[in-house]
């Protein structure tokens, strides 16, 4: 075998099993554990590598999935990409990543490129209207794009509700909701809806400022300044639609001489951690990022797509992060 690449036939001979058994192992088909171990050991000894291209031709698949995200410089998107890659690898698939900066032209061009590259499916976190067809399976994150396109999202309404209940439990009586985001409707809009519903039910005054991406921070800055009286804030609790916004609001409050959490308590949304596994940036509603990624992969690779739900809503949890008075 010197000077030649080992083949499946060589692996079968080394393992002492039938060629069909080797094929089953490398294609993820059921086979006895004893045989699987023997085949994998023989492949490792011989240095055999599965020919993914040939495997794809036989199966009529590429074993490649595209992930479309706004960017990888945000911890939430980076974590989502990491967990998606891991979930796909466990299913014998590779991942292509397309970064769009939330621009509609780039998002659509990514869709078009993916079609040409003949991937097995797309997982997309997008913020703009898209031209899609059913030739390539698509799973959306946070946006319902159509009845035949499953959407995976965290319980945004429940998260907003939990944020309001926590701030009220911690003594806040004059609340505000701050939001920045896409102009296109998405499940994330329900964060503010859940927050406002609790305030209305409990008779707690609540101000809402909902801005679009690119609007800047001036409206928030002016609101905070206008609600100052005698060096104190008339607002004692703020829920922000993302942890990034919560971090920015802390700086605006500091410019007015306000302390967090002593003067104003803040809760964000996402569960972003410093360096991926250290402390939180703020008290926050934690999204189950790993479960969102794994669920998206499961839905995309499902062999029977006739009973796939239009929306899968995953539970969230609250975590203190220093911007509330626990």
Image: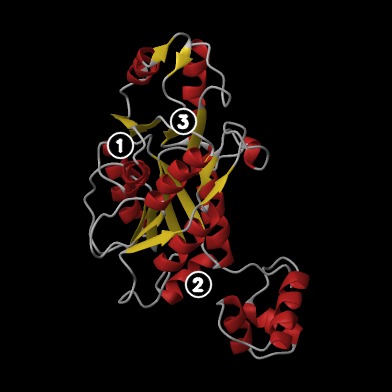
Residue assigned mark 1: 182
Q: Nearer the viewer, mark 2 or mark 1?
A: 1
Q: Nearer the viewer, mark 3 or mark 1?
A: 3
Residue 233 is situated, as x and y percent measured from the top left of the image, at: 45, 18
Question: Which quadrant of the figure has residue 199?
Answer: top left
Q: Nearer the viewer, residue 92 or 198?
A: 198
Secondary-structure class at tag 3:
strand
* Residue lying farthest to the front in this orientation: 203
Structural crowding at the residue carrying mark 1, measured as other residues with C-alpha within 10 Å and reported as few (<14), some (14–19) or many (≥20): some
How far separated are the C-alphas under marks 2 and 1?
Answer: 41 Å
Residue drawn where x is 55% and y is 82% of the image: 29
Residue assigned mark 2: 55
Q: Nearer the viewer, residue 276 or 60?
A: 276
Q: Which sits earlier in the primary sequence, circle 2 or circle 1?
A: 2
Question: Which quadrant of the figure has residue 22?
Answer: bottom right
Coloring basis for residues: secondary structure
Residue 202 is situated, as x and y percent measured from the top left of the image, at: 36, 44
Secondary-structure class at tag 2:
helix
Q: Which mark is residue 237?
A: 3
Residue 269 appears in the rendering: no
The answer to whether residue 84 is left or right of residue 183 is right
Residue 290 is situated, as x and y percent measured from the top left of the image, at: 54, 55
Residue 21 appears in the rendering: yes
Q: Nearer the viewer, residue 263 or 44?
A: 263
């Amino acid at each position: 075998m010197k000077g030649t690449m080992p083949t499946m036939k060589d692996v079968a001979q080394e393992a002492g099993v039938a060629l069909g058994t080797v094929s089953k192992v490398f294609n993820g088909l059921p086979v006895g554990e004893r045989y699987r171990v023997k085949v994998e050991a023989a492949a490792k000894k011989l240095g055999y590598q599965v020919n993914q291209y040939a495997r794809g031709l036989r199966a009529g698949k590429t074993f490649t999935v595209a992930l479309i995200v706004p960017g990888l410089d945000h911890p939430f998107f980076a974590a989502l990409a990491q967990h998606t890659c891991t979930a796909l690898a466990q299913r014998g698939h590779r991942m292509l990543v397309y970064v769009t900066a939330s621009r509609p032209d780039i998002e659509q061009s990514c869709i078009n490129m993916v079609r040409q590259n003949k991937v097995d499916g797309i997982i997309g976190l997008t913020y703009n209207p898209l031209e899609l067809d059913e030739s390539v399976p698509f799973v959306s994150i946070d946006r319902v794009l159509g009845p035949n396109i499953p959407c995976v999202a965290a319980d945004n309404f429940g998260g907003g509700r939990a944020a309001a209940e926590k701030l009220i439990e911690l003594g806040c009586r004059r609340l505000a909701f701050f939001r920045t985001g896409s102009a296109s409707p998405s499940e994330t809009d329900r964060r503010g809806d859940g927050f406002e519903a609790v305030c209305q039910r409990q008779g707690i005054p609540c101000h809402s400022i909902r801005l679009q991406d690119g609007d800047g921070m001036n409206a928030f800055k002016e609101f905070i300044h206008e609600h100052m009286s005698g060096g104190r804030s008339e607002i004692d609790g703020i829920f922000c639609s993302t942890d990034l916004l919560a971090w920015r609001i802390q700086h605006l409050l500091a410019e007015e001489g306000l302390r967090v959490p002593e003067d104003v308590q803040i809760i964000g949304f996402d569960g972003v951690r410093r360096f991926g596994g250290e402390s939180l940036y703020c008290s926050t509603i934690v999204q189950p990022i790993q479960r969102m990624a794994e669920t998206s992969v499961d839905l995309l690779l499902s062999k029977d797509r006739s009973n796939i739900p239009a929306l899968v809503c995953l539970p969230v949890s609250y975590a203190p992060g220093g911007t509330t008075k626990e």
